[in-house]
Image (cartoon, rainbow, N blue to C red):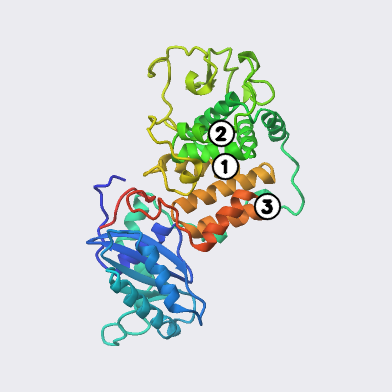
Amino acid sequence: MKASAAITVRGPEDILGYIPHSLGYWPRDSLVAVTLQGKRVGATLRVDLPRLPADLMQFAVAVRRYLEADSNADGAVLAIFSSNAWEGLPREFGPLLALLAQELAEYGTPVKDAWYVGDSYWRDALCMEERCCPWPGRLLDEIRDSRVNAEMVFRGSSVGSLPEQVPPAPQETSDQPLLPDPLEVGFFEGLSRLSGRRSQFMLVLDAWAYALAQPPKGITAKQAAYLRAALRIPAWRDAVLVMCAADRLVAIDGAERFGVFEQEDPEPEGIEAGGYDPEAFGPDPIESGGFIETGGFEPWILEPGLAGRGLPLPDTEGGRDGQVPCEIGRRPARAAVPGYGEVLLGLAPAMPDWKSLDALDGLLDRLGAGGSAEAGAAALTGRGWIAWCRGRGSYAGAFLGRALALAPDYRLAVLLNEMVGRGTLCGWAGNPKSAWQKFREDVA
């Protein structure tokens, strides 16, 4: 959807209809705050409603601090979604809304409107006059039938399940350990022996770049097994995340900083030994002149300077100096190369490659549907990180919780889960200019 095709909000039912599309699901027992930038909708924040009795002032301050991330906001609207007794909501959460209005007004983000949304009705939370806002309120169908909701659906958006209701993979629900995938086992044994070699690192990044350019369902079982095996090596897993968010050069530079390349590279004729299976992604890269054919698809190139092998590359249409550009992880080099930590925290680059991260999320979903528990935990952790980068803490927590259920000591999942639990916001999500947008546009 083009940025010029703004969706016009004409009433409160339109804003309330927009919220589930912005979050990806219909919230439950939640406070949702939407910032306003003049006549445009800004960021959307969802937090669990506090369990009363609670320190409501502390809660209001925390919400205000989150909303401060939208430096362009000049107002906000609030909605309380609750399945509690409808008639008790004003009495139960009226004091919270009053504190929020006071706190946000003091910091230049006045509350323009607020609503209660229940299981059957919704109503204005700032007006209790019977003559203009009669009890019990307006039917929920007005939100579902709103113009904005219909427009979002028309443009391809959908409201999915709650994060905790996302269907688990087979290895998450089986009472007995699943039989290991012999393909994944074989690949992992070979890749593990070569995990310190630069040449193997390059082949793995190329395999991921190729897979990310395909529809997830187009990945064969053999290719999926290879990718799952690669995910089980932490340095390679992190490199894939960084390559998609930033670029390939950042992934390579970070691997060098961490001392990943500890083994000497073999002679060219030995590169495929033990880890790379030519039949998984194409013929032997050495025999094909330094690039890997992909069964009729565009070739993906190992750049000589990056691969460190100095192999000649054939002249190919569409490339320059014998190289074929790859959309995933192939950006121009920059003077300052961020580290893995900066990328994983969303502090650099200034704008992540959301298209690549969206593709990675789909591919990890495909890979997480089978394979070993360790590979499943790696895939779920990757998806949790992407959800956190998007500012979707509920989904992030759900994915990370499932990863830890498969592998309780999975280090990256533990660290990310701690950050999500503390309410830490990803750097990209806290900046309206870099934050993920479902349709890459504002709603007017």
- Mark on residue 219? 2
Query: Toward which corner of the image does residue 408 lie, by quadrant?
Result: bottom right
Which secondary structure lies at badge 1?
Answer: helix
Which secondary structure lies at badge 3?
Answer: loop
* Whether residue 347 is situated above or below residue 133 in the rendered picture: above
Which secondary structure lies at badge 2?
Answer: loop
What distance separates the C-alpha of mark 1 from that of mark 3? 23 Å
- Mark on residue 232? none
Q: Amino acid at mark 1?
A: Arg
Q: Which residue is mark 3?
A: 409
Q: Looking at the image, do the residues carrying marks 1 and 2 touch, with CB atoms under 8 Å apart?
A: yes
Q: Residue at x 34, y 74 (%)?
A: 103
Question: Callout 1: few (<14), some (14-19), or many (20+) C-alpha neighbours within 10 Å?
Answer: some
Is 81 positioned to the left or the right of 148 in the image?
right
Of the pair 340 and 270, the residue shown nearer to us: 340
Q: Earlier in the sequence, mark 1 or mark 2?
A: 2
What distance separates the C-alpha of mark 2 from that of mark 3? 29 Å
Q: Amino acid at mark 2?
A: Ile
Q: Residue at x 54, y 32 (%)?
A: 256
What distance separates the C-alpha of mark 1 from that of mark 2? 9 Å
Q: Which residue is mark 1?
A: 366
Badge nearest the viewer, 2 or 3: 3
Is 311 positioned to the left or the right of 139 in the image?
right
Q: Amino acid at mark 3?
A: Asp
